[in-house]
Structure formats: structure tokens, C-alpha cells
Image: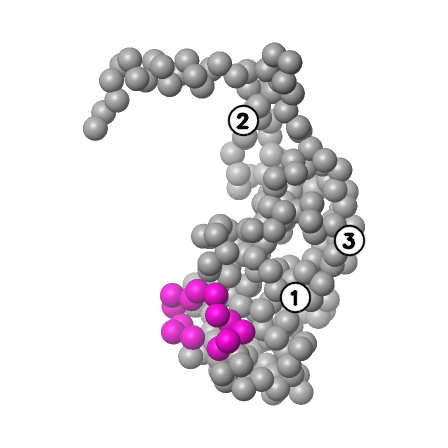
């Protein structure tokens, strides 16, 4: 149903009641982000002021980053939009699909539900850092390729990091333990058979 002219005019009036300005969304490297559009940032209105950001220190992939971010920003948003680490995927944003998984002090978490300010003082590992620390492809990544567990690849970073965490805690998991570890990681391509085979292969390779 199309909106009437009066409704549209009222919506425009409400939208324009708060002064706004646009700011480019910049990466840590200083380049304007090409993946995300310019954002509208609310400014002060009357006697009210908007919190623009808090100083936050994050250790990501062994490097320390000093950032100024709003307190409500999720770790997923900061990793992708501020640090250019787009291997961490944005999907459901409800903690249901596993695509945004990163390791926090060695444990897998859904970064879409985790506030960036709460990650201070912790070691954050993304898929980019995994390859870097291994000096190439990690054995888990190699096994995923060899066993055909990668098709579209969207779920792969989260699954790889969940596998790394599993094998760190349990170097010789059973098939049932593997299936339990990847609960919450949705894959619409492989049917999970190749994923389980890849994890078993990685466990054998790393033993």
C-alpha cells in the first residue's frame, strides 16, 4: 500500500527534527571503507549530547589496537568495519548461524552478540590471524580444502575456528563430539558430512 502525501510529509518532518551530519566510515588503516556507505551520525540536540565514542584497547591477532567506538558496537562490527577483518562474516546477527565466530582467549564466541568493549584485555583471534600464526594455511584449513568441506565458503571461517578450539581441548574427538562442537554452525552446501570428515582428518594430521 502506498503512503499518503500527508504521511510522507510527517515522516520527513520527524526525520529532519534532529540535526545530522555524515561521516565516512574509516578503517584502522586510514582508508575510507569501500564496503560500507557513509553513515549518518546524530549530533547534539538542545541540551542533549550524543556519546560519540569510548577509548577501547583490543588485542586482535597479536596486535594491539587503540580505538574510539560507541559502547554499543559489537565486536563483529568493529572487526569488519574498523579493522578491515572481513573474514569474520555477518549473517543472522542473532547468534544462531556461527558465521561470525571468533576465538576469545581460545574459546569460540558469536561476535555479533559480544560488545567490543567487553573484549578488552582478552586475546581475539580471527581467521586472518590463524593463517598468519601458522605461517600459511593452518592444518585445519588444509583439511577443509582436501575433504571438500568448502563450497560457497561463507560458513568456513567460523567452522575452522570452532574446529581449532575443539582440537586444542580435545585432540582426538569422536564423530559425536565433533557434531556436538559444530552445533550452531549452519552450512547449506555440504550437508556436514565433508565437514566432519575434514575435522577428523585435521585431528589425525595434527596428532
Relative vertical location of residue 135 with respect to residue 113 in this rendering, above or below: below
Q: Which tag is nearer the camera, tag 2 or tag 1?
A: 1
In the image, 165 versus 142, the foreground residue is: 165
In the image, 35 versus 46, the foreground residue is: 46
Numbered disc total: 3
Q: Magenta span: helix, strand or loop, mainly? A: loop
* Residue position for label 1: 107
Q: Which mark is residue 152?
A: none
Q: Residue at x 59, y 54 (%)?
A: 111
Q: Residue furthest front?
A: 47
Question: Going from the N terminus, do you reach mark 1 or mark 3 first?
Answer: 1
185 falls in the magenta region: yes
Q: Residues within 10 Å of mark 1 (few under 14, many from 20)?
A: some
Q: How crowded is mark 2: few (under 14 residues within 10 Å), some or many (20 or more)?
A: few
Q: How far apart are marks 1 and 3 (CA)?
A: 14 Å
- Tell me, yes or no, whether the two marked residues, 3 and 2, touch with CB atoms within 8 Å: no
Q: Residue at x 74, y 59 (%)?
A: 123
Over which residues does the magenta segment extend? 179-192
Q: Is mark 3 on a helix, strand or loop?
A: loop
* Residue position for label 2: 40
Q: Which tag is nearer the camera, tag 3 or tag 2?
A: 3
Relative vertical location of residue 39 with respect to residue 35 in this rendering, above or below: above
Relative vertical location of residue 79 with respect to residue 195 in this rendering, above or below: above
Amino acid at each position: 500500500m502506498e503512503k499518503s502525501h500527508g504521511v510522507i510529509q510527517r515522516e520527513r518532518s520527524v526525520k529532519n527534527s534532529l540535526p545530522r551530519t555524515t561521516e565516512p566510515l574509516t578503517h584502522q588503516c586510514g582508508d575510507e571503507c569501500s564496503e560500507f556507505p557513509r553513515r549518518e551520525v546524530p549530533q547534539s540536540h538542545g541540551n542533549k549530547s550524543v556519546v560519540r565514542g569510548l577509548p577501547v584497547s583490543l588485542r586482535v591477532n597479536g596486535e594491539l589496537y587503540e580505538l574510539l567506538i560507541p559502547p554499543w558496537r559489537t565486536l563483529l562490527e568493529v572487526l569488519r568495519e574498523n579493522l578491515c577483518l572481513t573474514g569474520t562474516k555477518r549473517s543472522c546477527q542473532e547468534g544462531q548461524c556461527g558465521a561470525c565466530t571468533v576465538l576469545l582467549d581460545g574459546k569460540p564466541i558469536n561476535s555479533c552478540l559480544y560488545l567490543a568493549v567487553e573484549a578488552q584485555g582478552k586475546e581475539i583471534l580471527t581467521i586472518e590471524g590463524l593463517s598468519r600464526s601458522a605461517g600459511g594455511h593452518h592444518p585445519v584449513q588444509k583439511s577443509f580444502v582436501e575433504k571438500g568441506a568448502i563450497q560457497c565458503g561463507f560458513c568456513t571461517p567460523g567452522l575452522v575456528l570452532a574446529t581449532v578450539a575443539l582440537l586444542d581441548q580435545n585432540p582426538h574427538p569422536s564423530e559425536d563430539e565433533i557434531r556436538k562442537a559444530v552445533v550452531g554452525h549452519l552450512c547449506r552446501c555440504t550437508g556436514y558430512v565433508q565437514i566432519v570428515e575434514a575435522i577428523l582428518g585435521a585431528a589425525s594430521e595434527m596428532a
